[in-house]
Amino acid sequence: MALFGKQRLSLYLDLIRWDRPAGWLLLLWPSLSALWIAKGGYPGLHLLAVFVLGTVLMRSAGCCINDVADKEFDRHVKRTANRPVTSGRISEKEAIFLAALLALFAFMLVLTTNVICVLWSIAALLIAIAYPYAKRFVSMPQAVLGIAFSFGIPMAFAAINGADLAIDRAFEAVPLTGWFLLISNLFWVLAYDTEYAMVDRDDDLRIGIKTSAITLDKYDVPCVMFFYLIYISSWWSLLSINRPSLWIDGCALLAAIQALVHYLLIRARQREGCFKAFKLNHWLGATLFAGVALSYL
């Protein structure tokens, strides 16, 4: 089957969720926030381009890997049954080839930074590959996704701080601030991906997939709100200490208001409300990034 052509291109764009940018925006905002914090302001066009383009490429590659790993599960879920790999319109080999090609392009971008950032990117890739299989064995696979989706943070600090460090000093490129931000961001991923898992809870229970929505059971909604509380309050407290600004305070307040809107959407545990809440999350991340960027003007 031809790899190119208008119809084939349309399938590939569907495979990488090109029409659903929320996924890569969820990856992007924490990474950009970390870049601004690590640099103490605008990091320059080069690093900005590396992280924006790299985020889009790696999220796209992750979609390919995820669809191959979940092919047998997705065919039993109404929302995912018509995905290109699941429906057979794209073969597994094609999807893996596309994932490798996209990851290679992303890696070439990282090579323009420094060796330490390259090392952290390899760790990020390994975690991203492991995530699709975690739901078979881990009761809270969203925590694995949280680490994968937060690894742009140590990479951002490494891109800024790692240029003059030897390989054996890779951990020195990422200060405690970076790890604090990563752990904090993990709770945001737990919040929005639990909302996402609530959409498919009935199907996942039937086919035996492990998710946080199933594990948390009736405590799913209060736990999601608790995750938002930890995420927003920890970012606000860290930034208020290191870079006190009314911008930080105002944007943190706006983020908290958005979290309350999410509560209104998910409290009834209806598919439509939970999915809408998930899709709105990139605005919450954008709000906190705006607070960071404006505070460094």
Image: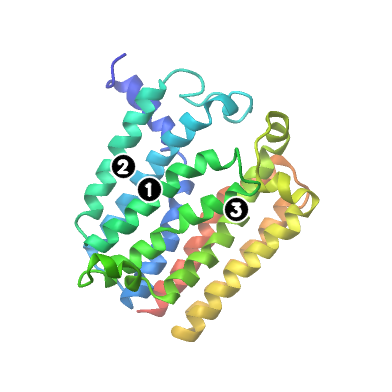
State the separation of the CA atoms marked 3 and 2: 25 Å
Q: Residue at x 67, y 37 (%)?
A: 200
Q: Which residue is mark 1?
A: 125
Mark 2 falls on what kind of element?
helix
Q: Residue at x 24, y 68 (%)?
A: 44
State the separation of the CA atoms marked 1 and 3: 21 Å
Q: Is residue 1 above or below residue 38?
A: above
Q: Is residue 263 above or below residue 89?
A: below
Task: Tell me, for residue 83, which label it has, or none.
Answer: none
Q: Nearer the viewer, mark 3 or mark 2?
A: 2
Residue 10 appears in the picture as rendered: no
257 relative position to 296: left or right: right
Task: Tell me, for residue 192, which label it has, or none.
Answer: 3
The image position of residue 273, as x and y in percent, is 69, 46
The image position of residue 277, as x and y in percent, is 63, 51
Residue 157 appears in the picture as rendered: yes
Q: Nearer the viewer, mark 1 or mark 2?
A: 1
Image marks 1 and 3: residues in contact by CB distance under 8 Å: no
What is the quadrant of residue 234 in the picture? bottom right
Mark 3 falls on what kind of element?
helix
Q: Residue at x 41, y 24 (%)?
A: 92
Mark 3 or 2 closer to N-term?
Answer: 2
Q: Which residue is mark 2?
A: 103
- Colour scheme of the picture: rainbow
Mark 1 or 3 closer to N-term?
Answer: 1
Position of the C terminus, as image quadrant, is: bottom left
Image marks 1 and 2: residues in contact by CB distance under 8 Å: yes
Badge 1: few (under 14), some or many (20 or more) residues near its Cα, within 10 Å?
some
